[in-house]
Image (cartoon, helix red, strand yellow):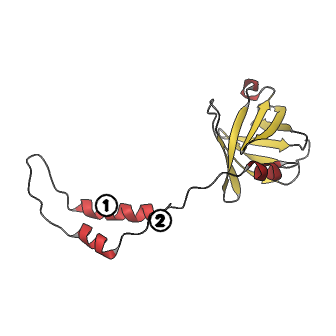
Amino acid sequence: MPRSLPSDRTVTSLLQYRTPTRTPGRRWFPGLAMAMAMLLGMVSHQTPAQEALTGDQIRSLITGNTLQGNFMANPLTMVFYADGVVRGAIGLTGSDSGTWEIEGDNYCNEWVTYFSGVRRCYQWISQGKGYLLKNVDAYRARNIQGQIKEGKPKGY
């Protein structure tokens, strides 16, 4: 939950300069109070954490559609078929296929060759017009970013 802005009284008391009793080896920095007040203001204006999509939302979003995005600075295409098959390509490494399913509120896939065929699971987090796929399994693969395009591209 975002913090509320400090009251004028709090800011005023933070900005008042008082010379503290000097302790040997310590210095009072007059700008410290100003920096603290600015920090409090910055924290209060941050947007709340974005929430992950539910399993039903993910299924509805991806079934029959395509994710186009990036993985480790390489172009990525993933096509999600209604029967649980996923086909895709990462950069120039050629294409691969595998299976996908929704487990709780996570999307999981298992490719034939990508990731050595190890099953990976992700949360889908909405980011403006796109999505962040945040890896949530024990392997901690890098996150994926992309946008959902309706249908499948030519050749899939």
Work out whether 33 lies above or below 60: below
Horizontal side of residue 63 vs 90, given as left or right: right
Query: As rendered, which of 66 and 106 lies closer to the eye?
Result: 106
Query: As rendered, which of 95 and 44 lies closer to the eye?
Result: 44
Question: Within 10 angstroms of label 1, few (less than 14), some, or many (20 or more) residues?
Answer: some
Horizontal side of residue 17 vs 55, given as left or right: left
The residues tagged by marks 2 and 1 sit, at their Cα atoms, a distance apart of 15 Å
Quadrant of res 41: bottom left
Find the residue positioned furthest to the bottom: 8
Residue 99, image x, y percentages: 83, 34
Give the residue drawn at x 24%, y 70%.
13
Residue 26, image x, y percentages: 14, 49
Q: Which mark is residue 23?
A: none
Find the residue positioned furthest to the top: 116
Residue indicated by mark 2 = 45
Find numbered disc 1 in the image and state the secondary structure of the residue it sits on.
helix
Quadrant of res 111: top right
Q: How many marks?
A: 2
Q: Quadrant of the C terminus?
A: top right
Give the residue drawn at x 9%, y 50%.
23
The amino acid on which the numbered mark 1 sits, given as a three-letter code, is Met
Q: Earlier in the sequence, mark 2 or mark 1?
A: 1
Residue indicated by mark 1 = 36
The amino acid on which the numbered mark 2 sits, given as a three-letter code, is His
Horizontal side of residue 78 vs 44, given as left or right: right
